[in-house]
Image: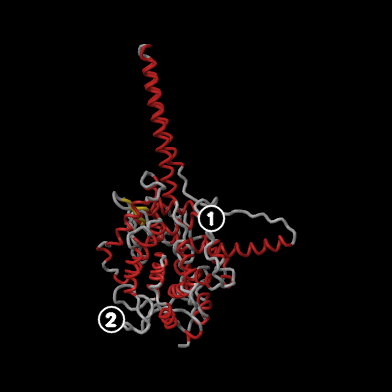
Amino acid sequence: MSTIEEIDTDETFTSDYINARNDEVDDIITATTIAQKKMESSIFEKLNTTENGNIIEKKKIIGFLSNGIEKIPTSHQGLDSSKVWISFWILNGMDMLDSLDSYPNISNRTSKYLSLLQNDENGNITRENNQGGGGFGGGNSHTSHVVSTFAAVSALYVIGTEESYKTIDREAMYKFLMRMKTKEGAFTSEDGGEFDSRTTYCAIAVASMLNILTPELERGVVDFLLSCQTYEGGFGAYPFNEAHGGYTFCSVAALSILNSLDKIDINSLHRWLTFRQSNDGGFEGRTNKLVDTCYSYWQGAVYIIIQSYFNYYKKQEDLKASEGGEDVKVQEEGLLFNQSKLQEYVIRFCQQSDKKYSGFSDHPHRGKDYYHTCYGLSGISLSQYNEIGKTIQSLNTFTNTFEQPSPPITKKSTNTFTISINNNNNNNNNNNNNNNNKNNNNNNNNNNNNNNNNNNNNNNNNNNNNNNNNNNNNNNNNNNNNNNNNQLVEPVHPIYNIKLSKCEKGLKYFYSLNSIGKSNQTK
């Protein structure tokens, strides 16, 4: 099997380079193009097999994720500071497959564990290195970190119970976020830590989720994020950095929360984003880099956010036209990227299965992991619902209201987009035809027997044929039902990457509480 390895762009050229150069004299050969050729070979190899096909192996994925609730592989021992993220990846993945809420005692166990990672506002805890409290650490006895805090709040949102919501100390959280704020308008990761568009998004997202987003927290954020947009159109981690898919999502999502999408060069962003989907169907994070499963969410969500922006203004234009007496026709449209190709890349090429478990990897023929399984499912989810952009329009109508954060989108919607299951149906039909041909041959052979047995044989054959056909039809129906169920992933919110029903439930809960006011801010 082919393997995909991390590419060091400064490495010396190998025999792969020489071979590639001989094949394509006129092309510019780089370490990345060599790796791309290897990936394409892996994809062709997958195309020539029946492995996985277009089916999401739901039960195996649930098994893989749920096993991580009880124990994680020894290979993860070095990820102590990422415990909270591993928790989110596993819980969110299970929730997208609609299997989390039925897991025994999951609310109590998650709430109790994450409460151990939360630092109080005064630092009155046993952690020796705590520097003021508030927020969540990445692991046991860790100081608070903005990115870990976002993961913890998101995980508690995914649990979606009052018990999980009450785990969060909003007062301490607000003081922690204010302490992380920089003069540039960004937020540092921790006391004395770095700051960039990623940490800034995490802070703004947490504040918006917990109803603690105030003018003091917002001050300077929009200007900082706008300064991160590059000449390419995407956004970097910091001003003058290279445009990157992850940082682009963070910047665009935060600006959407702050109702400031109209301030960016959105046409330039759209152009840069369009070139990030490769012929393989997956998204790359940067120019001239390999595609990666995780970007099916990071880049896919940006498409939906800006499409929601375009649709909002289109709706305003249509309203003005209708007021002027013009006949406006509502046209249903798909998303701005190739949905089927993206799903094919993630499901068919990057789903890694063994006899017991299944999950997603970053590239074909790499090992599955919790991170890519979570974001692979998120990307599939976004690409399956053409109306998904409506979920954020109420966050981006420039009114700063959260009255209806999640308009209903159901699996029964006519706009639901799913992978075709024709290939499986054709296989079943072929099997049925083969069975019928065999039965017909048997009937013809029986007809050559004596006339006394013809009636009995025909009756038996008819009964057998009817039974076989009924069984085949039942099997086909069961297969189709299983395929349909396995194809669909629960719809997630593009900005927060949380299942819509849980996102709506959490927003309603926290926006029913008193917001953090000036009296709180000056204490």
Instruction: Name the mark nearer the viewer: 2 or 1.
Output: 2
Horizontal side of 458 relative to 403 (left or right) equals left
Q: Name above or below for residue 517 compared with residue 440.
A: below
Would residue 29 be visible to someone looking at this image?
A: no
Residue that numbered label 2 is attached to: 126
Horizontal side of 203 relative to 262 (left or right) equals left
Measured as percent of width and height from the top left, residue 153 is found at 40, 71
Measured as percent of width and height from the top left, residue 79 is found at 30, 68
- In this rendered view, identify the residue nearer to me: 67 or 279: 67
Of all residues, the one furthest to the right in this rendering is 325
Q: Secondary structure at mark 2?
A: loop
C-alpha gap between disc 2 and disc 1: 49 Å
Mark identifier at residue 386: 1
Measured as percent of width and height from the top left, residue 420 is found at 47, 46
**By what rule are the colours in the image chosen?**
secondary structure
Residue sitting at x 39%, y 62% = 92
Q: Quadrant of the C terminus?
A: bottom left
Would residue 120 be visible to someone looking at this image?
A: yes
- In this rendered view, identify the residue nearer to me: 283 or 218: 218
Mark identifier at residue 354: none
Crowding around mark 2 (Cα neighbors within 10 Å: few <14, some 14 to 19, many 20+) is few
Contact between labelled residues 1 and 2, with CB atoms less than 8 Å apart: no
Crowding around mark 1 (Cα neighbors within 10 Å: few <14, some 14 to 19, many 20+) is many
Give the image quarter of residue 481: top left
Q: Amino acid at mark 1?
A: Asn
Give the image quarter of residue 94: bottom left
Measured as percent of width and height from the top left, residue 465 is found at 40, 27
Q: Amino acid at mark 2?
A: Thr
Give the mark nearest the N terminus, 2 or 1. 2
Q: Secondary structure at mark 1?
A: loop
Horizontal side of 96 relative to 254 (left or right) equals left
Of all residues, the one furthest to the bottom in this rendering is 523
